[in-house]
Amino acid sequence: MFFNHRKRTAAIAAAVIGAVCLSYGVDKPSQSGVGGDAAYKTSPAEAPGVLYSFEAYFLAAWAEEGAVNSKDDLLVDNITEANAKSKWFAYDISEDGHSCKAIAKVDIGNFKRNDYIMTKWSGNENNGFVHSSNNEDGIRYLMPNFFRK
């Protein structure tokens, strides 16, 4: 009798969790992975991490050398590896080493192929890096925290 009570409790808990997920619009998994909107949101999730890493490398080089005059001054380069592994974005560091751009390789919802997001050194340590995109409406939905103000 105790065993049946545990099964019933587990079934009720699963139903409650499922109902909560549905009420918040969480996509349920499908056979091919993640369904619906969630698939669009997981696709671009790699880009902010790569761009934030670039920011860390820039600041490390700036602290070590006192200035960054070219991309060769950066202490570490993760962009080559990210380009080789990513099926969603191509990454490009500017020649002066002050910005990094993630360019979409494929359409991701309203964020279309060749649209980009970018982080750029403002030139002022009080302002830090500025994040931008040529399609802010398309990417803001997918990465709302990338555009901090």
Image (spheres, rainbow, N blue to C red):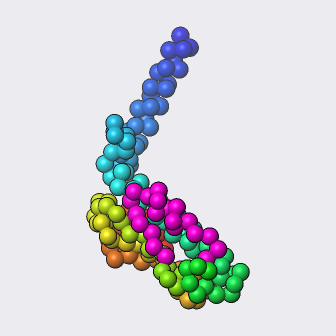
Name the side, left or right, on which 52 lies relative to 17: right
Q: Nearer the viewer, residue 127 or 90?
A: 90
Where residue 4 appears, as percent x and y from the top left, is 50, 14
Residue at 69%, 84% (x, y): give it: 65
Name the side, left or right, on which 59 lies relative to 91: right
Where residue 136 appears, as percent x and y from the top left, is 35, 73
Residue lying at the far right in this picture: please name it.
Answer: 64
Residue at 58%, 87% (x, y): give it: 69
Q: Identify whether 50 is placed above or below 13.
A: below
Please indicate, yes or no, whether residue 147 appears anywhere in the rendered image.
Answer: no
Name the side, left or right, on which 10 lies relative to 111: right
Residue 7 lies within the magenta run: no
Magenta region = 74-93
Residue at 55%, 79% (x, y): give it: 71
Please indicate, yes or no, whether residue 101 appears anywhere in the rendered image.
Answer: yes
Where residue 44 appears, as percent x and y from the top left, is 41, 60
- Hey, which quadrant is residue 97 in on the image? bottom right
Where residue 53 appears, as percent x and y from the top left, is 57, 68
Residue 78 lies within the magenta run: yes
Q: Identify whether 100 is placed above or below 105.
A: below
Residue at 29%, 61% (x, y): give it: 107
